[in-house]
Image (spheres, rainbow, N blue to C red):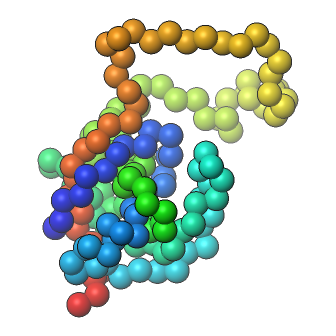
Amino acid sequence: MQALCVIVNTHALYVSIISQSVFEQLSPPPSLSATKAVLLGPGGNIATKREFTAQVTHKNNSNPVQCFVVGAHTDNLLSRGAATHLGLIQRLHAVEEEDDPLYASLDSKPAKCKPVHITLSEAAVPLAFMQLVEFRFLSCRR
């Protein structure tokens, strides 16, 4: 197993990514599969190279995680779903659009209203945090 430092990305439910430069340092590297996934980030399309599956472990929790290798120099991101399964975060309450009848009645256009100002206390904890987890690659090139 190799330990990698990842940022838990609570915004992405199922997408975990690893940069090409970090992937190239893995020894032995996991076997890659072609991917047709199109990943979108705040800046537009993310160049997805290939994908692999890793068994990710934190303390006594383990979970298989699909990881996408991206060409951009970026932080390694662990999805909200994987982080929840590993016990790193806990979902208190989430509303999914397809599950809530309120969303069905809303127009998809942005609401026109006064700007909203949110003030955080100095003790506020950010949603993203770094965590060291262990990756065991399910199939590796030798």
Give coordinates of residue 7: x percent, y percent: 35, 45
Number of on-image labels: 0
Q: Residue at x 42, y 56 (%)?
A: 74
Task: Identify which residue, 109 or 64, lies in the foreground.
Answer: 109
Q: Quadrant of the C terminus?
A: bottom left
Horizontal and vertical percent position of residue 94: 52, 29
Q: Is residue 18 above or below residue 114?
A: below
Residue beneath the point at 41% across and 80% down: 32
Return the residue found at the far front. Answer: 73
Q: Quadrant of residue 99?
A: top right
- Say which of 127 and 47 sits in front: 47
Residue 83 at what x, y percent from top left? 34, 45
Is residue 115 toward the left or the right of residue 33 in the image?
A: right
- Horizontally, residue 11 falls left or right of residue 23, namely right
Nearest the camera: 37 or 76?
76
Q: Residue at x 29, y 42 (%)?
A: 130
Q: Is residue 40 above or below residue 110?
A: below
Measured from the top left, where is residue 89 in percent x and y? 33, 35
**Residue drawn at (25%, 44%) of the image:** 131
Q: Of residues 109 and 19, which is closer to you in this image?
A: 19
78 in relation to 90, above or below = below
Look at the picture and state if 106 lies above or below 75: above
Quadrant where the N terminus lies? bottom left
Relative horizontal placement of residue 119, taking residue 26 as reference (left or right): right
- Asked if residue 98 lies left or right of residue 110, the reply is left
